[in-house]
Structure formats: structure tokens, C-alpha cells
Image (cartoon, helix red, strand yellow):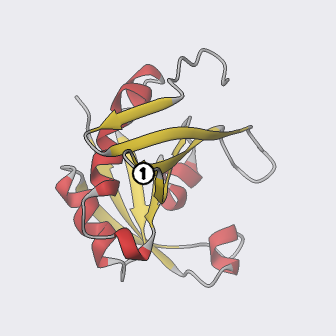
Amino acid sequence: MLPGASVSRSLQDRDLLLLLHKIHPEDSSKGYTPAYEFLMFREHDLELLGHLSIRIGDNQNLRNWDGHIGFAVLENHRGHAYALRACKLVIPILKHHKIDPVFITCDPINWASRKTIENLGAKFIEIVDIPEWHESYFLGNRQKCRYQWNLG
């Protein structure tokens, strides 16, 4: 567990089940903060739907390029608001770690993610260039949309 963490191994909303899959340690050499990785499942048949990560802490990487939350839904399960619901399920964890505001980023052409983030109530801040030294740059990404989600 992360220091001071009290994370349930599972979170549920109707048919959506989040199971804690991995806890990633900090890697300050890469600017990575500790993180929780959850797998998304459909509850009744345990079909894998995707994943969601929560990155704990606050640094330039999180605020500008990586975001506090990252998610992906498998293509054949998109369109059911699983990512939106998963983000809402982890609000208690974000609050426990005093992460407010929450920064979420996505690729500018990822309209589905942008819609999900906006449906959370997050506000678009700007599109930023990814620096050449950032890992995402090596994967071919050049820009990120930055959003700020105030939990209140």
C-alpha cells in the first residue's frame, strides 16, 4: 500500500466493478509518482472492460502531460460510460490523498476521452506541447489537452 493509503481492493457501481490490480512505486528519476492501477470488469460475467490509473502526488508531469487519472476502455466496450463511472468511483481515493484539483489529460484528437472528461465536470484549460524528453513524446504523442476537475 502507498503510505497513508486506505484503498479498497474493489469498487462497484451497478454492473461496473473496479479491482485493484497493481500499486506502482514512485520513480523520481522519470518523474513518476506512486500510482494505483485498477482493472474495469463487468460484474455479472467478469468481462474485462478496460483500466483506470490514479497517480498520487503533484508535479509538473501530472499537471501538464500525465494527469492524475488515466483510463482506457477496450474498443468493443466503448459507449457505456464505463470510464466516466470509474472516475466517479475513485473520488474517495482522490480525496483521501488530498488531490483536488485533479488534472486529467488526453490527446487532442481523442474526442471520446475529451467528452468523458467534460462530462465529469472538468474544465478545459489548454492544449500543451509535450517536451522532447517526455516518455509520451517517444511514443509519437506531441500534444495533450489539459483539464482541471475540482472535486470540492
Left or right for 40, reference 142: left
Q: Position of residue 75 (x, y in %)?
A: 41, 76
Left or right for 18, reference 122: right
Query: Mark 1 packing: few (<14 Cα in 10 Å), some, or many (20+)?
Result: few
Task: Say above or below: 1 vs 112.
Answer: above
Amino acid type of the residue tagged 1 in the rendering: Asp
Could you tell me which residue is drawn at 38 percent across and 44 percent down? 43
Q: Quadrant of residue 126?
A: bottom left
Could you tell me which residue is drawn at 56 percent across and 80 percent down? 141
Res. 81 in view? yes
Q: For numbered disc 1, what is the local secondary structure?
A: loop
Left or right for 8, reference 111: right
Q: Position of residue 90 (x, y in %)?
A: 39, 35
Task: Say above or below: 149 vs 70.
Answer: above
Residue nearest the viewer, comparing 71 with 148: 71
Considering every residue shown, the one lying at the far right of the view is: 29
Could you tell me which residue is drawn at 34 percent across and 32 percent down? 91
Q: Which residue is mark 1?
A: 45
- Where does the C terminus fall, quadrant-wise? top left
Task: Say above or below: 142 vs 118.
Answer: below
Left or right for 1, reference 145: right
Q: Position of residue 58 (x, y in %)?
A: 54, 38
Residue nearest the viewer, comparing 123 with 60: 123
- Where does the N terminus fall, quadrant-wise? top right
Could you tell me which residue is drawn at 40 percent across and 54 percent down? 104
Res. 124 in view? no
Counting labels gives 1
Considering every residue shown, the one lying at the far front of the view is: 45
